[in-house]
Image (cartoon, rainbow, N blue to C red):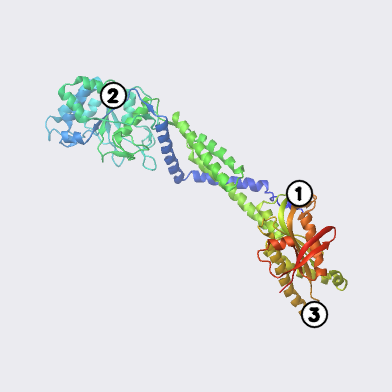
């Protein structure tokens, strides 16, 4: 039969392919919009930021200064923070000497006077503010309560701060509660509001645009303790103050272990080891200001960039690959997109790459599922259409795509079985044609199953004869054992059929089986329009001639010496010696009959 025709998959209509493509693309887009994908994007962004921070770290030549309120400062200043007016006044006086470029207070100053509790404290703080305000830019932070209302600042302090002297202490987190970006568009309707870092940047003459914090800028931040600054002021050490602050931005805030902490992609605190990413808020403000001082925050590329990349990844639907190769390609694409994201961050841009990853993986996976379903349908179709025309081993090779559809063959070690019905010519003369066909079909049904059970391949039917191959297309270590096993089962099945025939008043059948093992050319033989899976060569010719000896020698099974030698336990055989066969030199054969 023309087996090359059935190895081709049934074509899928264009509209079916387009509909499946549209379905996969739509599903991928919907999946990309889910909160889970947003979380994955944020997690991947953190990994990219860490890679950029480690591989492409940029050390600033003229960095800012963080003045920290630490545990040692609390020991030196035992009063409650609300009564630190004199300490803060001293600090501000020191800044007037050190002359930084701008000072920011990541610290909520009081809403009212505390002179009734500590007389003279308001005056001490006001003097410090006035002195510092005359020398440097000054921005005082203000807190926002749970209702989004700005907490008021004591009126004299606001007056001294002046225009642009206050800013909100806001660090808006992403959906996973990690602070990664800076923006001043935080009003009820998205309108901009002044922030501490934004106001400090304006004092420095910098543009303030929203974006992602740049963690490439380093090194990790340390701090100068507040009590150390005040000690220099008390000692009159102007040189240390000028060396620490001269011309540099300064931010004052808490660096205490459990106060004002926010999650970050990386740990900014140089004095804290490990992977604890709960970072003091003052360091986040400092890193934002660093970013603005070094060319601006990381700018997010518009959504069309991500959509274009995702659309390009949908083309993976047209790539048909086996599962392992598809997984390997998906990993390569994900790695490439990760590298693209890192490259973009390196140049101050942020490109969301998880949606394209999801779309690409969905396209590849969807195509694999579609192909798998099509293959399953094709296998069912092939089985239904051709199971009656080819032997199960050949059918399996066709379904698995391992059987070449090219004409020709391969040299294989096989055992060939020929079987023929004895006295068939006489039988056919005495029986109507339709009844004869029915009888033959009953016979073939029995013996075919015996051959298939032993893994044999039926090459062809020749009237009442059968040719079967053992060892191809499926390789066998000892094909003779399978062929002889099939011969025994064929005779046993024939015995059952004969009992049925005798009960019906019909003549019993007798068969002869010839076996020979050796090398033969096995494959598609014939023309492109019509060919069979068969075997040719001396092995096939000898097997056919040996089958012809069965009638004269009186044995239902006759095997060559080569077959008997290949059997593990050749019991019940009778040595029949050398026997002449037509067109060939004599062959040493053995006979076997049912015990």
Residue at 67% of width from left, 64% of height from top?
453
Q: CA distance from mark 2 to mark 1?
A: 88 Å
Left or right: residue 243 versus residue 566 is left
Q: CA distance from mark 1 to mark 3?
A: 48 Å
* Pointer 1 with pointer 3, Cβ within 8 A: no
Does residue 68 sit above or below 4 in this rendering? Answer: above
Circle nearer the viewer, 2 or 1 = 1
Label 2 or label 1, whichever comes before in sequence order:
2
Does residue 144 sit above or below 438 in this rendering? Answer: above
Circle nearer the viewer, 3 or 2 = 3
Q: Give the crowd class for mark 1: few <14, some 14-19, many >=20 residues within 10 Å.
A: some
Where is residue 409 drawn, in percent x and y? 74, 50
Where is residue 412 drawn, in percent x and y? 71, 53
Q: Nearer the viewer, residue 315 or 148?
A: 315
Left or right: residue 580 versus residue 136 is right
Please give the label number shown on residue 346.
Answer: none
Residue at 61% of width from left, 45% of height from top?
320
Q: Nearer the viewer, residue 579 or 488?
A: 579
Residue indicated by mark 2? 102
Residue indicated by mark 3? 505
Label 3 or label 2, whichever comes before in sequence order:
2
Residue indicated by mark 1? 408
């Amino acid at each position: 039969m023309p087996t090359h025709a059935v190895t081709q998959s049934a074509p899928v209509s264009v509209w079916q392919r387009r509909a499946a493509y549209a379905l996969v693309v739509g599903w991928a887009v919907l999946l990309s919009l889910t909160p889970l994908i947003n979380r994955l994007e944020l997690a991947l962004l953190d990994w990219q930021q860490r890679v950029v921070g480690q591989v492409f770290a940029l050390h600033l030549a003229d960095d800012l200064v963080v003045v920290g309120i630490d545990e040692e400062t609390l020991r030196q200043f035992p009063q409650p923070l609300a009564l630190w007016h004199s300490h803060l006044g001293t600090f501000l006086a020191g800044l007037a000497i050190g002359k930084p470029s701008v000072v920011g207070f990541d610290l909520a100053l009081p809403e009212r006077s505390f002179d009734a509790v500590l007389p003279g404290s308001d005056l001490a703080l006001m003097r410090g503010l006035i002195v510092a305000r005359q020398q440097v830019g000054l921005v005082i932070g203000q807190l926002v309560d749970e209702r989004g209302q700005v907490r008021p600042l004591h009126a004299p302090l606001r007056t001294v701060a002046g225009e642009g002297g206050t800013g909100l202490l806001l660090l808006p987190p992403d959906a996973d509660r990690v602070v990664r970006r800076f923006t001043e568009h935080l009003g009820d309707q998205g309108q901009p509001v002044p922030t501490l870092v934004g106001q400090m940047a304006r004092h420095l003459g910098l543009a303030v645009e929203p974006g992602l914090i740049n963690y490439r800028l380093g090194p990790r931040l340390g701090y100068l303790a507040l009590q150390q600054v005040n000690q220099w002021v008390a000692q009159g050490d102007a040189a240390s103050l000028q060396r620490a602050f001269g011309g540099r931005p300064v931010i004052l805030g808490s660096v205490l272990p459990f106060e004002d902490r926010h999650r970050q992609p990386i740990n900014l605190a140089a004095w804290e080891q490990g992977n604890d990413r709960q970072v003091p808020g003052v360091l986040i403000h400092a890193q934002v200001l660093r970013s603005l001082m070094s060319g601006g925050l990381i700018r997010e590329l518009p959504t069309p960039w991500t959509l274009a990349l995702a659309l390009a990844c949908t083309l993976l639907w047209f790539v048909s690959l086996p599962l392992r190769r598809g997984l390997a390609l998906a990993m390569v694409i994900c790695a490439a997109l990760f590298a693209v994201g890192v490259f973009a961050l390196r140049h101050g841009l942020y490109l969301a790459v998880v949606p394209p990853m999801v779309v690409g993986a969905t396209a590849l996976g969807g195509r694999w599922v579609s192909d798998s379903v099509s293959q399953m349908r094709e296998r069912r179709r092939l089985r239904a259409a051709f199971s009656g025309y080819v032997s199960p081993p050949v059918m399996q090779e066709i379904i698995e795509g391992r059987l070449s559809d090219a004409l020709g063959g391969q040299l294989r070690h096989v055992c060939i079985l020929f079987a023929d019905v004895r006295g068939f010519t006489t039988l056919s003369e005495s029986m109507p044609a339709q009844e004869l066909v029915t009888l033959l079909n009953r016979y073939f049904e029995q013996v075919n199953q015996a051959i298939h059970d032993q893994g044999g391949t039926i090459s062809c039917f020749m009237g009442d004869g059968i040719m079967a191959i053992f060892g191809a297309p499926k390789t066998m270590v000892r094909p003779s054992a399978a062929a002889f096993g099939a011969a025994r089962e064929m005779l046993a099945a024939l015995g059952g059929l004969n009992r049925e025939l005798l009960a019906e008043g019909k003549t019993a059948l007798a068969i002869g089986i010839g076996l020979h093992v050796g090398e033969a050319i096995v494959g598609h033989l014939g023309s492109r329009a019509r060919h069979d899976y068969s075997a040719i060569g001396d092995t096939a010719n000898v097997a056919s001639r040996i089958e012809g000896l069965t009638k004269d020698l009186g044995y239902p099974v006759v095997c060559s010496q080569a077959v008997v030698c290949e059997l593990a336990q050749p019991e019940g055989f009778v040595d029949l010696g050398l026997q002449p066969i037509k067109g060939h030199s004599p062959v040493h054969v053995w006979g076997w009959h049912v015990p």
